[in-house]
């Protein structure tokens, strides 16, 4: 497998007992991505519990409490690879009280798998998860209509669920949505094609994951380079070396480009792009590189290198959609530390515009108390200017996190509107 195999991150979401963990177990098992000893260990556990066959869900439920209760509580990350792609799976919990875990697991995903139990059809959680996926701007949704074996592989059931989801998904901001009927338990249409559903002519889940086009998910238009650190080796060989290291958040940077540094506004030209493996002529997200400029400009961590004629908004007033993570509710006029790319500042929450009822997508402007797992639109004022884009334009420069300075806990994640 080459170093340049594309990496696809996907997240799973669905109601409790829709079979998310079983689906991932089946994906790992059928794509030959687990070891014999892992398989033996879960065979033994399944036998102990008196289950028929091997319970593949045990592969992902790593916490003992999850295995005992048979549910997923925290975000479980699993890694597997096929010759075509590498995958990172964030298996997120289905319970309402774990909305924050889903936001965490899904924030970097290219694809969201939304599981629907064929017997129950579209439930409240299906809508919640589809909405969160669209809020987080996950570019591709795959609706896995699972447990088809329990509805006699009925095409009518599949078509009905497909219609229901298409009915509300046009209200969401989702461009690419696929539907796959499957049975994770038996393995229909997960890795291998199903012989029980000859009426379905589409691809299997693994084929879809291997071939979904993710090259254009990054923003290659707006050049954004948040500086993480300044590299100055104090030795004779690199006497005058001064490089700015960081990870490209957007756009393509080329040697010889004119760039501007924020917040100072000074301009210069890219003299050289260095990486651990040698020099590059051009660099793009999500590469980590060191930029060298032709002029000596005072640049430090938290500054951003951009193109002269394409700049982010420089502002101290932000409107964000905030998902609240903490047991203690949000304090209006409360002060928090705010992290944005490599920059840290402090902020005050000026007002809560509305709380979003995720189940109905209704804007509640009356009751603006924001508690754990709530999502709300709020106005922030920061102590230092931030260089932001709208989240829908760039998921890196459009996201912030808030930290409680007393306890150092991350209390919220926000998406700039």
Image (cartoon, grey):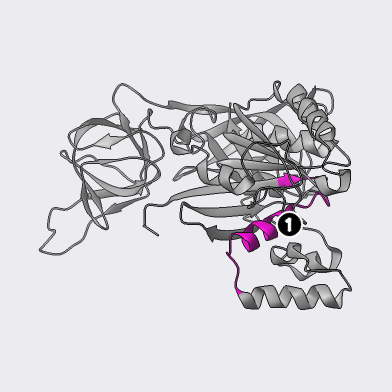
Total marks shown come to 1
**Other-residue count near label 1 (Cα within 10 Å), few / some / many at <14 / 14–19 / ≥20:** many
Residue 18 among magenta residues = yes
Which quadrant: the C terminus? top right
Q: Is residue 385 visible?
A: no
Residue at 13% x, 53% y: name it: 240
Residue 177, quarter of the rendered image: top right
Judge whether 55 appears above or below 214 on screen: below
Q: Nearer the viewer, residue 293 or 251?
A: 251
Q: Which residues are magenta?
A: 13-35
Read off the residue under disc 1.
21
Judge whether 64 appears above or below 304 on screen: below
Residue at 72% x, 55% y: name it: 187
Q: Nearer the viewer, residue 46 or 329?
A: 46
Judge whether 42 appears above or below 223 on screen: below
Residue at 65% x, 38% y: name it: 142
User: Residue 147 in the image: x percent, y percent?
Assistant: 81, 48
User: Residue 366 in the image: x percent, y percent?
Assistant: 84, 23
Judge whether 22 appears above or below 362 on screen: below
Q: Name the side, left or right, on which 346 lies relative to 197.
A: left
User: Residue 190 in the image: x percent, y percent?
Assistant: 67, 50
Q: Name the side, left or right, on which 270 lies relative to 55.
A: left
Query: Which type of secondary structure does the marked residue at label 1 adopt?
Result: helix
Q: Is residue 105 visible?
A: yes
């Amino acid at each position: 497998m080459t170093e340049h195999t594309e990496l696809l991150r996907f997240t799973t979401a669905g109601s409790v007992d829709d079979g998310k963990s079983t689906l991932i177990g089946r994906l790992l098992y059928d794509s030959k991505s687990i070891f014999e000893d892992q398989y033996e260990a879960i065979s033994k556990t399944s036998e102990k519990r008196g289950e028929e066959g091997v319970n593949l869900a045990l592969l992902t439920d790593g916490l003992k409490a999850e295995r005992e209760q048979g549910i997923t509580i925290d975000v479980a990350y699993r890694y597997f690879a096929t010759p075509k792609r590498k995958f990172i799976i964030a298996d997120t919990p289905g319970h309402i009280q774990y909305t924050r875990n889903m936001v965490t697991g899904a924030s970097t995903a290219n694809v969201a798998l939304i599981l629907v139990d064929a017997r129950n059809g579209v439930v409240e959680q299906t809508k919640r998860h589809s909405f969160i996926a669209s809020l987080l701007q996950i570019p591709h949704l795959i609706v896995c209509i699972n447990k088809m074996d329990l509805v006699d592989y009925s095409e009518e059931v599949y078509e009905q669920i497909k219609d229901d989801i298409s009915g509300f998904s046009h209200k969401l901001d989702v461009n690419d949505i696929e539907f796959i009927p499957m049975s994770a338990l038996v393995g229909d249409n997960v890795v291998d094609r199903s012989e029980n559903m000859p009426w379905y002519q589409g691809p299997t889940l693994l084929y879809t994951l291997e071939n979904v086009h993710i090259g254009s998910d990054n923003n290659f238009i707006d050049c954004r380079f948040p500086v993480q650190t300044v590299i100055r080796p104090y030795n004779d060989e690199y006497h005058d070396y001064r490089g700015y290291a960081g990870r490209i958040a957007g756009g393509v940077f080329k040697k010889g480009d004119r760039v501007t540094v924020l917040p100072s506004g000074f301009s210069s030209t890219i003299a050289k792009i260095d990486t651990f493996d040698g020099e590059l002529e051009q660099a793009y997200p999500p590469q980590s590189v060191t930029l060298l400029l032709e002029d000596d400009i005072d640049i430090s961590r938290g500054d951003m290198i951009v193109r002269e004629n394409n700049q982010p908004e420089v502002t101290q007033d932000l409107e964000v959609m905030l998902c609240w993570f903490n047991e203690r509710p949000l304090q209006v006029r409360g002060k928090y530390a705010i992290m944005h790319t490599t920059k840290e500042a402090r902020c005050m929450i000026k007002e809560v515009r509305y709380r979003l009822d995720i189940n109905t997508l209704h804007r509640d402007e009356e009751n603006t108390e924001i508690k754990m797992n709530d999502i709300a639109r709020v106005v922030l004022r920061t102590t230092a200017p931030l260089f932001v884009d709208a989240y829908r334009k760039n998921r890196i420069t459009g996201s912030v996190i808030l930290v409680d300075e007393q306890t150092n806990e991350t209390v919220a994640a926000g998406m700039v509107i």
